[in-house]
Image (cartoon, rainbow, N blue to C red):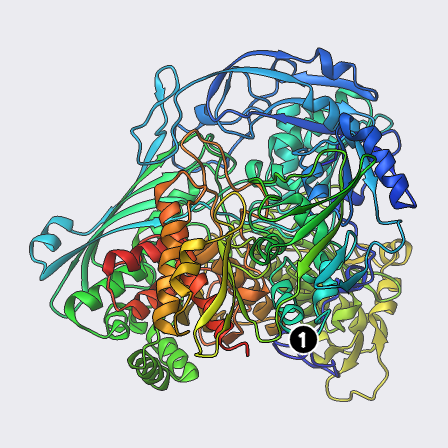
């Protein structure tokens, strides 16, 4: 459990970081922020990057702020920054609820939101948030900046649209309407574990009390978290409540394609998807 | 947990008090010394190259790339250590196991993923790991056995993978089954899990040429037997091998046995002429340190119409993993001998298939054999209740061994010794447990909640433990010229508080404050013998030896005081807080133990014809074990949608005979109960069909964390002291783990209202959801 040899770079500015990354990307250079996934992988020698570009010394990367209709989350904003709502309204409350499920507190004080997005673990809570709400990821390299909108960013287990020389500099989450209802649920065996399945649900109600703009995302089941159109279709235009939620949960359980090859485990994953989607919707109903 | 009392002599009894631990100061001030903290100048670091194949023939090992790594010093493969005999096991009457022992490096064949194939020595641990990664091992795969239910395969030509079948039998089995009112059959499985200490193993070998002494640092559990074995394996005299204990971050049975790595660091220190350090990493720990527990039982039980067991016939399959390690077949043997628990059963047969598989070798883990056998006999009790429509408690009551039959001899032996249950009123203890937990109200509450739609259940499991493995133990006790007491023992500390407990026993026997006693352990160069800290034996064996030594030393001190100082007879004197006083006149002139020690310095003592030194040995011999017991009660709630289980309430009871330090006993109960919860619900070494271990990090090998551990209620009783030792002691090291699997299974089954469905530990959410889905 000793990492292999690597060169360590500690840039002081974003430009410097991107320049170094441009130089070392071809030689298996990696950005390190909180290191809560990368360092254990290096200790187990599952990852053996030749270069680490440490962005912790760059001032201002931990900012979280609103810009127009978006919440902007800087590359070094730690998970723990979201323990209390970062903005007024449903989104801040949702993020504060979700963050409680990410590992354990000491890890949350170190690991970063954008690090989770770039790492793209299938069971990452923040990836589920990004996928369900439709986040915009801002990537920078010596070739310039670009935005990558989700869906389109996550490309399977631990895979994203980022090029090796691109650094994820911020994640932009669309703000939720003041009347948006949202709920999150995950099932794991012990607090802090990777989830067996998780679900995020948001919707609004029209003047007749019927569901509009339903978003239902499922994580930890497929290679990447994603919205489940079948579940959303089961909700749209319905009165919120047990019947609609059960239909959506059932639709989600049928729609997901678990990565597990073992049929028993895959079947179990569907059972848990049914549970967590239903519970996320129940939490959403109670959120306003 | 009790708040420690502040000690207030004079002449108080220290035994029975929850005094604070003597060993804590360095630990809580960051000055402890664990194996990784031990370093010597010019030391080398060892890294083990392990097999990636579960079974195969070694075709070639290419070390050329490893040799080019900076800092590389040496690499050994099997050929370099072919002269070292395989690691020994403790002999029992079970024969034929010697062919299945593990060599320190694989010779021609690898038999589990994680088996040491080569070792690299380098100047720092990073270089050692870099070089080890470059050792290329080519292995030609052979057929893999991953279950003890699979037909035995070939171990070596002419020997199959079932070295022995453990058999125990008494009574007329055939007649019992023929006359039975009913016969119950159960298939039960206990998952592969083990003790997982927070501190991984560590070993530092060092050869001191000036003294011609080989040292091993990082020893624990059994320093003296391990010294003797190392001496035999390396062809040295035991007196030229010294083992040194460090602090230890958990033992649980798995730490402190001789493993290949211990032998390798010593052999390398001798060969390379430099100290050699090896610290296990967690991934290694989970595939190289002993596993335990994995068994499959097919049990048949003949019962009468009242639910009394007439006969129990159990055929089980013990998954030993790839090799016979230091315990031989003791876990299978111990399982067989404890299958009847605290129950009176007239006819019995156990047939234990001790089988090798291509998985990590197994040995003892806290409550070895009993966690398994208790799961079996308690599942049986619940099944009888379900079959006859009886209250599960009533079924247990009808089968418990009556108090009038104590001591109760079972017509069988374990490890060659007859099984004699020494003391206990099991039924009365059950009543105490029920009263303490408020059973009737609890039952009513669970029933009410279930009617309201909750999936909650209540379970109880009874267990019999055993403790105090002999045959003998000794201490040397010395009072120095300042009155300080030194107690040297060959027993080891596993962090359980043995220093404090021995000091308390010594303090009472001698008449001093327990804080005056310095307990020295884990130094084979300071005392010639010791049988170690295992099988819940230290308090009983070393404690009794301490008691005997303290009384002898007291006698010696009183004799000198009476003759030389106080003009009295020894019978007129007492020792209070280190001062020898007249019983009838405590305010009369007195003398301290320090003065007596001065009086016994060599010149002074010899002049008066005495043996020098206020010092003595104490030896305690006991061939029979003592049997503490208890019961666990659990309330669980099942999440029908996910198969998750929440333990809402938990009570663990234990009758320890005499609790030297109740706080420490309760600590043992609490810690071991949490480990039991791991085996009941979380921990499992899962393998795929190719024999690859899937749980080699703490993400996959799930220890219970605080989020899943309930508040633990403890009922500690002292109703049944053991007649086998002078203080009535029984052991508490394995006190809280034995019945956890059994009671969790019982409570879950009660919640589901489906008798007989919980047959496999751990009860994972996936397994439980499958049960729920089948029942739909």
Residues A35 and B306: in front is A35
| Residue B382 is at least partly visible in this image | yes
Q: Residue A249: percent from the left, percent from the top?
A: 39, 61
Q: Is residue B714 above or below residue A16?
A: below
Residues B302 and A216: in front is A216
Q: Is residue B686 left or right of residue B180?
A: right
Q: Quadrant of residue B496?
A: bottom right
Q: Residue B421: percent from the left, percent from the top?
A: 37, 61
Q: Is residue B702 left or right of residue B525?
A: left
Residue denoted by label 1 = B14
Q: Residue A99: percent from the left, percent from the top?
A: 64, 63
Q: Chain of mark 1?
A: B
Look at the numbered disc 1 and give the secondary structure of its residue. Answer: loop
Q: Quadrant of residue B65?
A: top right
Q: Residue B376: percent from the left, percent from the top?
A: 31, 55
Q: Which quadrant does the N terminus of chain B fall into?
A: bottom right
Q: Which quadrant does the C terminus of chain B fall into?
A: bottom left
Q: Is residue A161 left or right of residue B615?
A: left
| Residue B764 is at least partly visible in this image | no
């Amino acid at each position: 459990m000793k990492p292999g040899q690597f060169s360590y770079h500690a840039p002081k500015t974003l430009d410097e970081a991107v320049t170094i990354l441009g130089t070392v990307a071809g030689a298996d250079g990696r950005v390190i922020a909180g290191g809560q996934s990368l360092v254990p992988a290096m200790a187990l020698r599952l990852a053996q990057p030749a270069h680490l570009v440490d962005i912790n010394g760059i001032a201002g990367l931990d900012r979280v702020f609103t810009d127009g209709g978006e919440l902007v989350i800087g590359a070094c904003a730690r998970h723990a920054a979201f323990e209390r709502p970062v903005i007024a309204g449903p989104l801040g409350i949702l993020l504060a609820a979700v963050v409680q499920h990410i590992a354990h507190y000491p890890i949350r004080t170190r690991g970063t939101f954008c690090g989770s997005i770039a790492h793209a673990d299938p069971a990452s809570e923040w990836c589920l948030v990004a996928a369900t709400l439709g986040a915009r990821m801002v990537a920078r390299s010596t070739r310039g900046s670009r935005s990558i909108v989700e869906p389109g960013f996550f490309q399977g287990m631990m895979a994203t649209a980022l090029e090796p020389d691109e650094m994820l500099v911020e994640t932009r989450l669309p703000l939720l309407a003041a009347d948006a209802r949202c709920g999150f649920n995950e099932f794991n065996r012990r607090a802090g574990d990777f989830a067996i399945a998780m679900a995020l649900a948001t919707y609004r109600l029209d003047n007749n009390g019927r569901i509009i703009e339903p978003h239902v995302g499922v994580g930890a089941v497929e290679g990447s978290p994603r919205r489940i159109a079948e579940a959303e279709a089961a909700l749209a235009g319905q009165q919120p409540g047990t019947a609609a939620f059960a239909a959506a949960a059932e639709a989600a359980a049928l729609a997901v394609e678990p990565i597990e090859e073992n049929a028993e485990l895959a079947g179990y994953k569907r059972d848990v998807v049914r549970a967590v989607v239903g519970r996320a919707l129940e939490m959403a109903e109670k959120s306003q | 947990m009790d708040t420690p009392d502040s000690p207030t002599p004079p002449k108080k009894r220290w035994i029975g008090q929850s005094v604070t631990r003597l060993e804590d100061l360095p630990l809580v001030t960051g000055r402890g010394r664990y194996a990784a903290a031990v370093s010597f100048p010019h030391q080398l670091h060892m890294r083990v190259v392990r097999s990636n194949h579960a079974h195969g023939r070694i075709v070639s090992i290419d070390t050329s790339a490893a040799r080019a790594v900076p800092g590389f010093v040496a690499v050994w493969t099997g050929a370099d250590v072919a002269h070292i005999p395989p690691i020994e096991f403790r002999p029992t009457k079970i024969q034929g196991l010697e062919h299945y022992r593990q060599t320190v490096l694989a010779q021609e064949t690898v038999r589990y993923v994680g088996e040491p194939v080569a070792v690299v020595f380098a100047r720092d641990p990073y270089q050692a790991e870099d070089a080890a990664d470059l050792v290329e091992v080519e292995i030609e795969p052979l057929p893999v056995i991953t279950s003890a239910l699979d037909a035995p395969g070939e171990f070596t030509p002419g020997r199959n993978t079932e070295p022995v079948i453990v058999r125990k039998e008494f009574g007329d089995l055939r007649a019992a089954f023929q006359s039975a009112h009913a016969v119950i059959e159960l298939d039960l499985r206990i998952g592969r899990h083990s003790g997982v200490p927070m501190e991984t193993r560590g070993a530092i070998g060092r050869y001191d040429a000036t003294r011609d002494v080989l040292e091993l640092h990082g020893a624990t559990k059994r320093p003296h037997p391990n010294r003797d074995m190392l001496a035999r394996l390396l062809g040295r005299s035991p007196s030229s091998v010294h083992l040194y204990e460090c602090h230890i971050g958990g033992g649980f049975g798995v730490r402190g046995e001789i493993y290949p790595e211990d032998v390798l660091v010593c052999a390398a220190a001798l060969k390379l002429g430099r100290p050699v350090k090896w610290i296990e990493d967690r991934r290694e720990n989970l595939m190289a340190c002993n596993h335990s527990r994995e068994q499959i039982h097919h049990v048949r039980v003949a019962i009468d119409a009242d639910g009394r067991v007439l006969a129990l016939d159990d055929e089980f399959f013990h998954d030993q993993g790839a090799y016979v390690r230091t315990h031989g077949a003791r876990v299978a043997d111990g399982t067989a001998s404890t299958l009847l628990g605290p129950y009176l059963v007239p006819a019995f047969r156990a047939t234990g298939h001790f089988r090798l598989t291509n998985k990590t070798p197994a040995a003892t883990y806290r409550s070895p054999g009993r966690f398994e056998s208790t799961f079996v006999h308690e599942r049986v009790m619940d099944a009888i209740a379900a079959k006859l429509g009886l209250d599960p408690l009533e079924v247990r009551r009808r089968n418990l061994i009556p108090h009038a039959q104590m001591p109760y001899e079972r017509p069988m032996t374990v490890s060659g010794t007859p099984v004699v249950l020494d003391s206990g009123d099991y039924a009365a203890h059950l009543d105490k447990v029920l009263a303490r937990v408020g059973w009737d109200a609890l039952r009513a509450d669970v029933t009410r909640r279930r009617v309201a739609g909750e999936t909650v259940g209540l379970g109880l499991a009874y267990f019999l433990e055993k403790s105090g493995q002999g045959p003998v133990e000794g201490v040397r006790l010395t009072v120095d010229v300042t009155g300080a007491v030194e107690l040297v023992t060959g027993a080891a500390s596993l962090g359980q508080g043995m220093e404090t407990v021995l000091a308390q026993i010594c303090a009472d026997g001698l008449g001093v404050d327990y804080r005056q006693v310095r307990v020295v352990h884990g130094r084979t160069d300071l005392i010639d013998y010791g049988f170690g800290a295992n099988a819940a034996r230290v308090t009983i064996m070393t404690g009794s030896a301490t008691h005997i030594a303290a009384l002898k030393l007291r006698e010696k001190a009183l004799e000198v005081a009476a003759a030389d100082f106080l003009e009295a007879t020894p019978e007129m004197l007492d020792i209070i807080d280190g001062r020898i006083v007249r019983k009838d006149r405590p305010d009369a002139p007195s003398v301290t133990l320090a003065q007596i020690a001065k009086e016994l310095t060599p010149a002074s003592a010899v002049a008066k014809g005495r043996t020098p030194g206020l010092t003595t040995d104490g030896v305690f011999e006991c061939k029979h074990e003592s049997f503490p017991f208890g019961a666990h009660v659990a309330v669980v709630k099942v999440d029908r949608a996910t198969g998750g289980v929440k333990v809402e309430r938990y009570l663990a009871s234990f009758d320890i005979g005499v609790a030297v330090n109740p706080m420490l006993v309760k600590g043992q109960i609490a810690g071991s109960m949490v480990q039991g919860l791991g085996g009941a619900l979380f921990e499992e070494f899962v393998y795929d069909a190719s024999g690859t271990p899937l749980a080699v990090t703490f993400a996959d090998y799930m220890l219970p964390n605080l989020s899943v551990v309930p508040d633990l209620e403890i009922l500690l009783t002292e109703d049944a002291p053991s007649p086998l030792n002078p203080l009535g002691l029984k052991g508490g090291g394995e006190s809280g783990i034995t019945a956890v699997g059994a009671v969790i299974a019982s409570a879950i089954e009660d919640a589901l209202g489906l008798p007989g469905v919980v047959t496999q530990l751990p009860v994972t959410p996936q397994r439980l959801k499958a049960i729920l889905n089948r029942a739909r």
